[in-house]
Amino acid sequence: MSDIQLHYGPGFVPLCIPEENAATFFRPGQSNSVPETVVWETILGREPYFRFCREVKDRHLCILLEDGTRDLPLESVLPHICSSLFGCRQVRFLLCTGTHNADTKENRYIIAQLQGLISQSCLRHVDILVHDCTSAKFLDAGYTPERTPILYNSVIRDAEMFLVLSDVKPHYFAGYSNPVKNFVPGLCAYSTTEKNHSLALDERSTYGIHPWHPDSARRDNPLACDQVEAMGRIVGSRPVWALVMISTAGQMQWADFGPVQEVTGRAFVQTDLRNSFTVTPQPYLIVSPGGLPNDVDLYIAQRALELTKNAVTDGGQVLFLSACPRGVGEAHTRAEFYDRLTKPLDVILSDIDRAYKLFSHKPYKFAQMIQRLAKLWVYSDIPDEQLSAAHLNPVSNPQTIIDHWLQEDPAAQINIVDGANKVALYLPHGNRRIGQGKST
């Protein structure tokens, strides 16, 4: 027997799976990584960094940070960033929350980190703001070709340069989590996000595809293209620099610094090399999003299922290990996410043809997956009755599910994914997805 430990909330879940039944074990960061000190020496010793330090002098710089729902390794990043800012006339840190709640424990922790570093660095003329998609004052930059209204937070009006900090990973409908998302939806109005995210229903809006990808065959993602268009309208002619990273469990694997489109494209290539895998589908699949903050609630954790669904055959079974200490999701997502997910599956799938409401793509994709599986088991802190109402099968002891699989089929093959929010699984014959979305 083989003992494994998969991330779950702040800790781990131990499982016992015979070696002959473990088909493939996927997790991010399996490739060789460079020590963090070498990463920083490489970045800080290159011309792009020196050029940034020259150009930012006497400028009003706006630094765009991911919010507390992401696990950007800020402890190792922020000291290096602050050391480059002494020449700035003014620095504004902005937490890009998109439609997430602005006032959270995690965001307050990031603010405290920033305040501590600012006081130690003796920087002057610095402030820290958190985006709120409902209460902020917005500027209007018109519409994208997809008719997405471009309404963005007015606090960036006076910025003369931008620096974006972004942990790059596969994203199940935006191609990748990347610096563009710090702008759209990161600092935009609710209505901007709603119209943009309606494009998640297009089957071309999927992971591994983005208009900034160096491979021209991997650029046709309508939702990501819409985000890039909106970002361009927001930024105008102002320079945008980026520090892009690939990290696992808070540890940096790779990073680069430079003009935003150049380094983002390189980050996509590195993400593909390090955290994208070809998978042979099996009848059984075990998935862990990777622990907190990736499984803080069901709304956030679902990404892991979308990125790994190619690893299970139609009619198969999935065991989902997702702590969800905050339940099914934030209150403002409930009506269009969880409440909609409790409807009959055929209703969920047919209702999507009506006017799109923000967050409703999630129950739609959940329903697609549930419908093609025999069982979707969930080990979670969410009450059993809430899971059952959403067509999910609660389990109190995940080992019993594995034992049952092996009792039914001693030769059962089980795919296992840990840290699933940062991996992308592809079928052997190309980029085709299972149950991705609606054809348009």
Image (cartoon, rainbow, N blue to C red):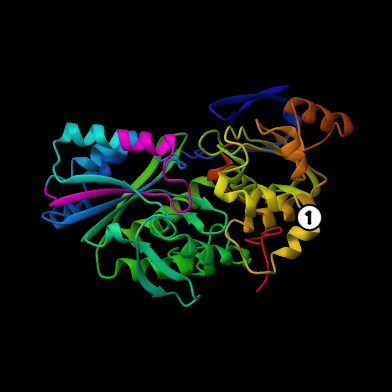
Between 407 and 250, the one lying in front of the other is 250
Residue 104 drawn at (x, y percent): 44, 38
* 332 relative to 184, above or below: above
**Residue numbers of the magenta segment:** 87-112
Question: Circle 1 is placed at which residue position?
Answer: 345
In this rendering, the answer to whether 243 lies above or below 143 is above
| 3 up-or-down from 95: above or below | above
Q: Can residue 279 be seen at all in this image of the molecule?
A: no
* Residue 72 quadrant: top left
Q: Is residue 101 magenta?
A: yes
Residue at the far front in the pictured view: 135
The residue lying at 39 percent from left, 39 percent from top is: 107
Q: Amino acid at mark 1?
A: Leu
Q: Is residue 411 left or right of residue 319?
A: right
Image x and y of residue 434, in percent? 70, 58
Residue 51 placement, left or right of 74: left
Image coordinates for residue 166, horizontal then vertical, percent: 38, 49
Residue 213 in view here: yes
Residue 411 in magenta stretch: no
